[in-house]
Amino acid sequence: MLAHSFSADIRSETLEAKIVQDADRLESLGANDLARTFYVSGLLGSVLFDSEDPFATERTLNDFEWALDHFQTKLLGLPGTMQTEEGRRMATCSARFLVIWMA
């Protein structure tokens, strides 16, 4: 099913497709994908964060260079892409956890 892919940017039409898309995105906000973010960043030779500006308040976000930037470039925006009310609720809760973890 292509409709659940984040990068394909295909709008889900059926309730089932919306639920699958939400589930896929919720998984991205979970502990496994948190670990995957750092694993992939390590494989790519990225640094965990910019020690002078870890939250990119004075620089452009770059999740290829800084692993922590991936939270702001993709993960924290996922609640706004959810297709169902319950998906938005769950994603918002998970995103709050990521923000607390980042701090």
Image (cartoon, rainbow, N blue to C red):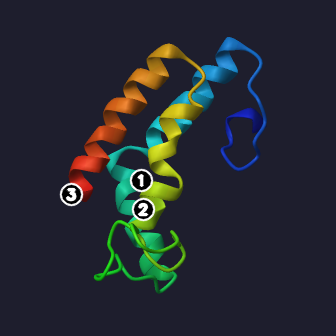
| Quadrant of the image occupied by residue 13 | top right
Specify which label sits upstream in the sequence, 2 or 3. 2
Quadrant housing the N terminus: top right
Give the residue drawn at x 44%, y 76%.
66
Give the residue drawn at x 43%, y 56%.
71
Specify which label sits upstream in the sequence, 1 or 3. 1
Distance from Cα at disc 2 to Cα at disc 3: 19 Å
The reply to whether the C-beta atoms of the residues labelled 2 and 3 are less than 8 Å apart is no
> Badge 2, how many Cα within 10 Å: few under 14, some, many 20+?
few
- Name the residue at the front extreme: 58
Q: Position of residue 7 (x, y in %)?
A: 70, 50
Question: Which residue matches tag 1?
Answer: 33
- Name the residue at the bottom extreme: 45
Give the residue drawn at x 32%, y 49%.
31
Local secondary structure at mark 1: helix
Residue type, label 3: Ala
In-image side of 96 versus 21 (left or right): left
Q: Position of residue 88 (x, y in %)?
A: 47, 24
Question: Which residue matches tag 2?
Answer: 36
Question: Which residue matches tag 3?
Answer: 103
In-image side of 46 versus 3 (left or right): left
Distance from Cα at disc 2 to Cα at disc 1: 5 Å
Q: Which mark is residue 89?
A: none
Does 67 sit above or below residue 3?
below
